[in-house]
Image: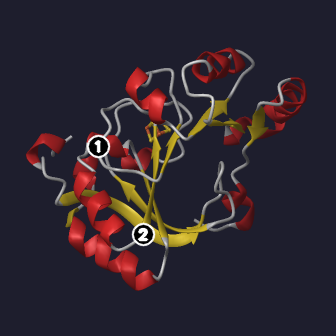
Amino acid sequence: MGIRSDEFPDGDRLPLVEEFFSLQGEGFHTGKAAYFIRLGGCDVGCSWCDSPFSWNPGLHPMVETDAIIERVVDSGADSVVITGGEPLMWNLSHICTELKKKNILTYLETSGAYPLSGEWNWICLSPKQNMPPSADICNVANELKVIIQETNDFLWAEKYRLMVTGNCRLFLQPEWSRFKTIIPEIVEYVKKNPKWRISLQVHKYMHIP
Ligand code: SF4
């Protein structure tokens, strides 16, 4: 992959794929403005991944974390979503600490396949079957978001519902390319299992990043 996260153990540089100020389109915080930071690097290998361009961190510049933080502050955003790729391949302690000093909320989107770093205001755990998450991250997730591609995925979702805490918000999200086929099943499932809510990728309908 060209670069490895252990070459940057302090998290003072991060492989930046893209950054933008937009609206959260998925899960519990849907509709809220947030500054998005997409980091490179992921070896989870989901067949339906909508950001495979992020997998190889070597294709993206190692950017000074403090420079990213400055741009967040300049944007006026009050919260940051760090996504990927799999952002926990990198040490996220520095970026979280510095954002917190500036009273900016820190939200994480992760598969949970790597150890947790950083202090977070919100952790959205989206487990993937190729590389299941650790029990540690299940214990601290604020939100469980399971991608539903086929009927068997409901069983997978229930397995992880039992591993997160009772306070964790539960979302089922249709895999985008199977949306038309799978959404009637999700609707029926949520009606029968009202602990779950549906999450739609509304940013894709709005044609915003
Ligand atoms: Fe793509 Fe996320 Fe799966 Fe990695 S974990 S392959 S970024 S969907």
Residue at 58 percent across and 21 percent down: it is 160
Which quadrant holds the C terminus? bottom right
- Near-viewer residue (56 or 153): 153
CA distance separating discs 1 and 2: 17 Å
> Can you see residue 131?
no
Q: Residue at x 34, y 67 (%)?
A: 99
Residue 117 marker: 1
- Neighbour tally class for label 1: few under 14, some 14-19, many 20 plus, Cα within 10 Å: some
Image coordinates of residue 163 in percent, x first then y, are 54, 20
Q: Amino acid at mark 1?
A: Ser
- Could you tell whether 151 is left or right of 95 in the image? right
Percent of width and height locating residue 17: 35, 59
- According to the image, label 2 marks what residue? 104
Q: Residues within 10 Å of mark 2 (few under 14, many from 20)?
A: many
Say what secondary structure mark 1 lies in.
loop
Camera-side residue of 54 and 120: 120
Up the image or down, 10 lies above or below 19; here it is above
